[in-house]
Amino acid sequence: MSINETLRAQLRANKRPVTQASVLPAHCYSSQDWYQDEIEKIFMKEWICVGRESQVARNGDYFTIEIGREPVVVARDHKNVIHAFLNVCRHRASKIVEGSGNARTFVCKYHCWTYNLDGDLLVVPGQPSPMIGAEDFDRKMYGLIPLRIEGWGGFLFVSFSEEVTPLMEWLGDLPKFLENYRLHEMVVGHELSYDVPVNWKLFVENTMESYHAGFLHNKFLSPDVDQAWKFLEAGGPYEAMYSDKSIMNFGNLPPADRLNEKQKTGLYHVWLHPNTTIHVTSTYMTYRRYIPRGVNQMTIMYAWCFLPETIAHPDFETIAENYYKRSVDILSEDIAFIPKVQEGLSSSRWRPGRYSPTEAIVHKLGNYIVDRVAGDQLAAAAADQR
Amino acid sequence: VKEAAVVEDAQEVVVQVHTRSGRSVSLTARLGRRLMEVIRDSEIPVKAECGGVCACATCHVYVAPDWISRLSPPDENEAALLDVAEESTQQSRLSCQIRLTEALDGLQVTMAPGSN
């Protein structure tokens, strides 16, 4: 993708300190080329959170997901090892499995090429064998294409990159920062997903600033409340902010046992590169994934997770139902509203506005996107001018 | 346990199937049919996800010791699938690969784990 001078100036304006920066230009939300570059330069290069380990709790369990254009299946094989594969038959490229379930083998329905859950091509059925005469055909060479998969905190991450560092190294100090929350022990209490006709970044940005909460969500939070968000210095591929007056701060269940005073009274919103957000509160954790489906189409996958002792609380069901209802009521306002931003971004005459410093993480997201997608070109253009 | 019915019509055989819940059912079948199809047409639950092409290992049965040697041995595909079938033993076969012949009249099998 080539970048013209106007766009280059707008991208540079985003790279200034948040107190001076302009928001991302419309091009970054409406250009097909820009979107394809995000997929190639971000989603094919990072660790992508694909779900929770509990989704493949038993041997034979599997679930599917898409990363960019790539269909992926995650499975726990019958020797208790978790794998990720391209969910595409090695024969003539049919997608193999859909949704989630439990299986002995993966059978492509087209010609019944059959794979073991560790990826080996087990059987090409047919009498007489349909591969008789296919020279040098060796089924050992046609196993499912494996992808890197690693875990932390009960989350599973997949990467298409051979170069990205091992997950625990990549995460930096995030595991240490969140260790009191015992995320790895948490189980999913409830989950939802919605298709929303917007660019994936718009929803991450919405989640990572609470400036709009007192306005768009004024039924739930008065604009007079100073949420007093504090932004953290992150030592890893994430950004985090803290408040004890957030719209999401509802804690009618007992707090987790190892939290310090700050963790007991407030909550953190974490954006983990590129498309995951995690909210940790004293009584629950939610995480969202924003799955790009096209330049102006995405799916939001939203899950609430709890510690086993929280679920064992006698009033858990009733209290948790209220959590879900309140969260979904708030989320529904965002889902209804954000498409109006996407509509506005189709304008060719709009010029980028300014950030409120309370939108510091929206600015960090902008910078991350600019660096990954256009960093090389901005640097080359700067070198030319010297 | 019921005794296998005496077959008068030579075009049919009787197979005794022990279910996962411990019942024993006699099934009468035409010669030449695959055992999986006969089970699927009965009240006995069987997954047989691939429909009988020797691809999924979910029509797995244990063949009674007296009978296992009377079957033709598994081919390469069936052997590969028996390797991954749940709780596979020396008695394991895929019922979609058992074609019923006169010699198999009276065959006894038990539905294996993962088949229902």
Image: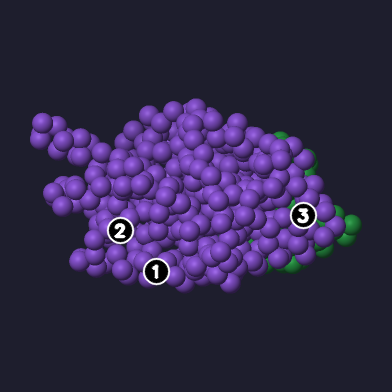
The residue under the point 40% across, 58% down is A202
> How far apart in space, not on screen, are marks 2 and 1 (Cα)?
18 Å
Could you tell whether A87 is left or right of A31 in the image?
right
Q: Nearer the viewer, residue A176 or A247?
A: A247
Query: Which numbered marker is on residue A353?
Result: 2
Label 2 lies in what chain?
A
> How far apart in space, not on screen, are marks 3 and 2 (Cα)?
41 Å
Q: Nearer the viewer, residue A367 or A355?
A: A355
The residue under the point 71% across, 40% down is A261
Could you tell whether A74 is left or right of B57 in the image?
left
Residue type at numbered disc 1:
Pro
> How far apart in space, not on screen, are marks 3 and 1 (Cα)?
34 Å
Residue type at numbered disc 2:
Gly
Task: Return the x and y of residue A110 as percentages of the image width and height.
Answer: 43, 56
Chain identifier matching the green colour in the rendered picture: B
Label 1 lies in what chain?
A
